[in-house]
C-alpha cells in the first residue's frame, strides 16, 4: 500500500490483537456431536419426569403382578376338590365301600385348632366366647337345679302303650319312604299338633319312640351307658357320612364327668373300619363312645340324624345337660366351660347359634328350594301352614335373629326345653327335614319359653372347627 509520502507500508496484524471494526473474522468450525450422545443425554431427565408423573400407576401394576404370581402359586396346591383314593378293602370284603375314589375336602388345616375367634366391639377386639380362666374351669361344678317358674311341670310322651286317642298304628318301615309318620313317630293329627302347643301343668306330646317296633334299636349295654350320663356331648353320622373328629380343649375334670357319644349306623361302622377307624373292645374310638344304632326308622338319613340331634333327652334320660355338635365339626372347648358361658352365666336353658345369612323363614324357604335341599311342593305345604297360623315375615327373638343355623345346640334338660325339642322334631317329620324352617315357628308358638340364648356366628366358630361334610350319606334301601 502507498502512503502520502510515496512509501510502501506493510501492516502487520498480531493474532493477539482484537478484530478491527468491519473486519470479517473467519468462523471456527464446530465439532458436531454424535446423535447417540444427544439421546443418552436427554434420556435421564425424560425418565425422571416419567417416574414423577406415573409413579402411582407403576406401583399398582407391580402390586397386581405380585398378586397374580401368588395366585398362580396357590393354584398349584391341592384344591378343595382334589380326589383321593380311599383305602381298598381287604380281600373278600365289600367292594362297594372304599374301593373307588372318594372326594374329600382338604380342610385338615382347621383340625385341632385351639386359637380363639375374636371380633371388634366398640373399637376393641374381644373374644367371641368368653370362657373362665383355666384354673376356674378345673374347679367348675354343675349347679344344683333351682325350682323352675315354668307352668309345665310334667311332660308325657305319647306311645303305643299310652296313646291319647285311637292312633293309626298300621305303619311299617317300608312305608316310611311314602309316609313320613311311622311306628317310630306315631301318627300325630293336626288336632294333636295344635294341642301340644298349649302349655299347662301336664302336656302330652309325640316325641319319637312311639312303638317298640318303630326302630332305632340300641343294645342293652349301650342303653346302660346312656342312662349313666349326667352331661353329654353328642354327634352322629348315619349312612357312612362324615369322619369322627376327636374333641379337644377340655379339662381333665370334664373328661371324667362328660359323656362323649357318637351315634353310628352299620353303614358308617363299615365305612369307618375300611378307613382304619375301628371301635375298641371297650366301645370307644379315642374319647368318643360309639353307639351303633340298628333298624333306623326313616329312609331319609337326614331325618334319622334328627333323632340324636333333637331327642337327646330321650336317649340320655338321666342327663341334666347336653351339647349337640354336627358331624362336620370338631368340638374344641371345655363342655362345662361352655355350659357356664352360654347357659349358667345368662340364666338360660337353651343356647343356639343364629343364622349367618338370613333372618326370615320365607327367605330361607326360597334358598332351600334354590339349593335343592327340599322340593318346592313340600316347602310350599309348610309355608302355607305357617302363614295360616300367622307366623310373621321377619320374626326376631329378643332383638336377635330367630332363624337358627342349629349346628351347635347347648341346653338344659327341663320339661319345657324337652317339649320344645319334641315339637321341633314333629315339625321336621311332618314337613321338611330342613330344621331351620321350623325352629322359628316352634319358638314363636311356644311363647312361654323365654330364656333362650341365641348367640352370634362368631361364637359358634369359637366352639368348633368346621371341617365340612366329607361324603354324602347313603340312603337306606327299602
Image: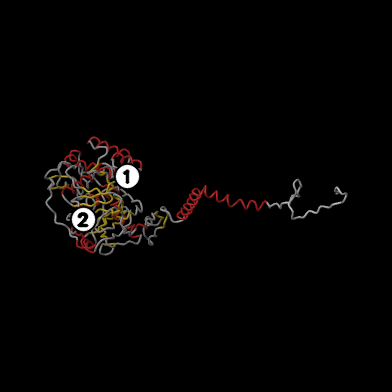
Q: Which residue is mark 1?
A: 357
Question: Splitting the image into 4 quarters, where does residue 465 fall?
Answer: bottom left
Residue 26 point in image, percent of width and height:
76, 50
What's the distance in space between the residues labelled 1 and 2, CA to CA?
Answer: 28 Å
First in sequence, mark 1 or 2: give its number.
2
Query: Closest to the observer: 54 or 407?
Result: 54
Question: Splitting the image into 4 quarters, where does residue 358 fall?
Answer: top left
Residue farthest top in this picture: 388
Q: Residues within 10 Å of mark 1 (few under 14, many from 20)?
A: few
Residue farthest right in this picture: 6
Q: Which residue is mark 2?
A: 340
The reply to whether dot 1 and dot 2 touch (C-beta < 8 Å) is no
Residue 13 point in image, percent of width and height:
78, 53
Residue 90 point in image, percent of width and height:
38, 62
Q: Residues within 10 Å of mark 2 (few under 14, many from 20)?
A: many
> In the shown orientation, is residue 124 left or right of residue 27?
left
> In the shown orientation, is residue 455 left or right of residue 105?
left
Q: Secondary structure at mark 2?
A: helix
Residue farthest front in this picture: 5
Q: Secondary structure at mark 1?
A: loop
Residue 150 point in image, percent of width and height:
13, 46
The numbered mark at residue 424 is: none
Amino acid at each position: 500500500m502507498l502512503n502520502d509520502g510515496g512509501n510502501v507500508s506493510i501492516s502487520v496484524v498480531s493474532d493477539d490483537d482484537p478484530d478491527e471494526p468491519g473486519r470479517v473474522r473467519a468462523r471456527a468450525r464446530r465439532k458436531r456431536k454424535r446423535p447417540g450422545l444427544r439421546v443418552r443425554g436427554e434420556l435421564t431427565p425424560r425418565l425422571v419426569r416419567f417416574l414423577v408423573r406415573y409413579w402411582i400407576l407403576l406401583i399398582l401394576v407391580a402390586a397386581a403382578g405380585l398378586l397374580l404370581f401368588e395366585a398362580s402359586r396357590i393354584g398349584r396346591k391341592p384344591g378343595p376338590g382334589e380326589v383321593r383314593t380311599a383305602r381298598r378293602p381287604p380281600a373278600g370284603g365289600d367292594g362297594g365301600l372304599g374301593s373307588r375314589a372318594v372326594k374329600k375336602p382338604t380342610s385338615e388345616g382347621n383340625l385341632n385348632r385351639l386359637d380363639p375367634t375374636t371380633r371388634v366391639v366398640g373399637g376393641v377386639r374381644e373374644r367371641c366366647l368368653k370362657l373362665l380362666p383355666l384354673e376356674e374351669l378345673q374347679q367348675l361344678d354343675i349347679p344344683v337345679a333351682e325350682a323352675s317358674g315354668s307352668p309345665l311341670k310334667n311332660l308325657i310322651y305319647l306311645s303305643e302303650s299310652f296313646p291319647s286317642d285311637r292312633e293309626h298304628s298300621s305303619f311299617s318301615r317300608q312305608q316310611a319312604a311314602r309316609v313320613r309318620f311311622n311306628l317310630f313317630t306315631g301318627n300325630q293329627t293336626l288336632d294333636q299338633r295344635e294341642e301340644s302347643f298349649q302349655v299347662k301343668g301336664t302336656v302330652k306330646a309325640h316325641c319319637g319312640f312311639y312303638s317298640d317296633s318303630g326302630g332305632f334299636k340300641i343294645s342293652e349295654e349301650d342303653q346302660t351307658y346312656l342312662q349313666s350320663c349326667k352331661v353329654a356331648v353328642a354327634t352322629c353320622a348315619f349312612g357312612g357320612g362324615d369322619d369322627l373328629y376327636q374333641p379337644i380343649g377340655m379339662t381333665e375334670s370334664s373328661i371324667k364327668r362328660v359323656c362323649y357319644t357318637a351315634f353310628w349306623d352299620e353303614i358308617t361302622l363299615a365305612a369307618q373300619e375300611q378307613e382304619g377307624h375301628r371301635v375298641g373292645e371297650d366301645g370307644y374310638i379315642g374319647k368318643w363312645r360309639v353307639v351303633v344304632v340298628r333298624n333306623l326308622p326313616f329312609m331319609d338319613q337326614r331325618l334319622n340324624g334328627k333323632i340324636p340331634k333333637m331327642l337327646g333327652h330321650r336317649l340320655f334320660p338321666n342327663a341334666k345337660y347336653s351339647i349337640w355338635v354336627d358331624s362336620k365339626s370338631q368340638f374344641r372347648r371345655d363342655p362345662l366351660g361352655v355350659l357356664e358361658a352360654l347357659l349358667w352365666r345368662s340364666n338360660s336353658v337353651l343356647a343356639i347359634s343364629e343364622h349367618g345369612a338370613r333372618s326370615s323363614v320365607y327367605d330361607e324357604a326360597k334358598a332351600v328350594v334354590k339349593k335343592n335341599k327340599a322340593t318346592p311342593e313340600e316347602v310350599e305345604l309348610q309355608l302355607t301352614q305357617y302363614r295360616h297360623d300367622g307366623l310373621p315375615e321377619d320374626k326376631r327373638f329378643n332383638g336377635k335373629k330367630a332363624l337358627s343355623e342349629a349346628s351347635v345346640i347347648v341346653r338344659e334338660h327341663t320339661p319345657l326345653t324337652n317339649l320344645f325339642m319334641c315339637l321341633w322334631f314333629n315339625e321336621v317329620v311332618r314337613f321338611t327335614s330342613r330344621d331351620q324352617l321350623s325352629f322359628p315357628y316352634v319358638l314363636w308358638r311356644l311363647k312361654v319359653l323365654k330364656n333362650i340364648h341365641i348367640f352370634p356366628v362368631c361364637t359358634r366358630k369359637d366352639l368348633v372347627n368346621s371341617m365340612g361334610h366329607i361324603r354324602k350319606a347313603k340312603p337306606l334301601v327299602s
